[in-house]
Image: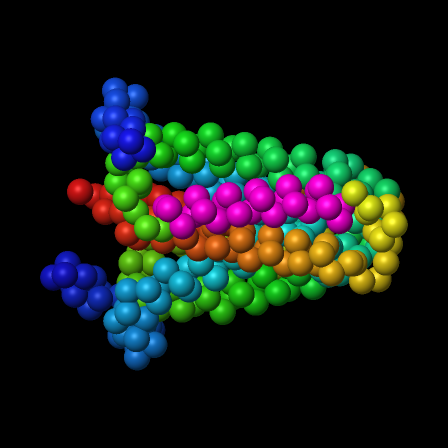
Amino acid sequence: MLFQLAHAIEASSFGTYLRESQYWFPALNLLHVLGLLVAAGTVVFWDLRLLGIGLKRTPVSQVGQSLLPWTWAGFAVMFVSGSLLFTLEAGRLYENIFFRMKIVFLILAGLNVLMFHFTVYRSVAGWELDRIAPLRARLAGGLSLLLWFAILASGRAIGYTLDYGA
Amino acid sequence: MQNLQDNLADAPLIIQWCQTSSAAQLIRTAKWIYPSIEIVHLAGLILVFGSMLVLNLRIFGRVLRSTPVEEVARGLAPITIVGLLLQLLSGPLLFVTSAVRFYQSVPFLIKIVLLIAALTYHFSVHRPLAFRSTNVTGQLRRSATVSMLSWTGVVLAGLAIELLA
């Protein structure tokens, strides 16, 4: 079912229009990478802070509240440009192993954020100035860094395994 | 391929040597090595660009307002260095694999010039200034603007190497 849907999206007039224009693909790719730089470039400092690296003297909740709007803004740009890139190549992306891996990593990263917010982050006021954050907070930070790296790596691998020239 | 051979003969000796070096040949033999090095290069970019973004946003009063600039600068500096090391190690490896193509790429040349300018400015002006600033001054703001523009230029020129190829 998803497979048919992916092919229908690729064959749609909108998907075809994006694919056949010579400017959309590089422009969307550029936006996707710029969104990534802002999203990942801010979220890493929050993850590293949970691990006790970097902005050590700022309370955890302040680093989060301050940086997360930028992370979301970057993520929104990534999401919109990524969805449009998907309509260009939906059929082939659906079958691409690295695309599937990337979607799994994205879902895992989202679950990690939810888990963190509804568990250990609830008591952040009690530990945010500690020299070493609770284990579950450090795990969430480390996992987030790993998942972002996995999203980056699988995303880049898509570019090498889809034959765009054909 | 013929075309590449012709270009190779026209390129300066050092460029020819890069492209035909054993390191370049090794990286070209396995399909996954080049993309892996590229991913390391991008991860380093996220650290370098991200730390510049956060520091300069702090200077413009957009983030971490209750932490003094100097503390933000000192907290981020080691992460910038780690990112730069990742990039300066992976970048030359990417370069040698297709030294001739990069040598002839205008965006690549622009990127290198901007990179040298951005690095020089960062270590001689922006970083020392941020390290001794508790308050935001006009001078610091100007320095943050130059910093942000120079790194954005490096990124855009770097992306243009692939996107315009």
Farthest residue in the top direction? A13
Residue A101 among those drawn in magenta: yes
SS majority, magenta: helix
Q: Does residue A25 appear in the picture of this structure?
A: yes
Residue at the spot 37% in from the left edge and 46% down from the top edge: A100
Where in the figure is residue B132, as x and y percent of width and height? Answer: 84, 56
Where in the figure is residue B73, as x and y percent of width and height? Answer: 76, 54
Image coloring type:
rainbow
Compared to B116, does B140 lie above or below?
above
Does B40 sit left or right of B123 as displayed? left
Q: Which residues are magenta?
A: A99-121
**Could you say which is closer to the camera, residue B145 or residue B158?**
B158
Where in the figure is residue A51, as x and y percent of width and height? Answer: 71, 60
Q: Does residue B129 appear in the picture of this structure?
A: no
Compared to A53, does A102 lie above or below?
above
* Quarter occupied by the N terminus of chain A: top left
Farthest residue in the bottom direction? B22
Residue A164 among those drawn in magenta: no
Compared to B88, does A150 lie above or below?
above
**Could you say which is closer to the camera, residue B151 or residue B94?**
B94
Residue at the spot 48% in from the left edge and 60% down from the top edge: B41
**Could you say which is closer to the camera, residue B52 or residue A46?**
A46
Residue at the spot 31% in from the left edge and 40% down from the top edge: A94
Does A141 sit left or right of A120 as displayed? left
Q: Looking at the rendering, which quadrant does residue B62 occupy?
A: top right
* Quarter occupied by the C terminus of chain A: top left
Where in the figure is residue B22, as x and y percent of width and height? Answer: 30, 79
Residue at the spot 48% in from the left edge and 49% down from the top edge: A105
Q: Looking at the rendering, which quadrant does residue B121 occupy?
A: bottom right
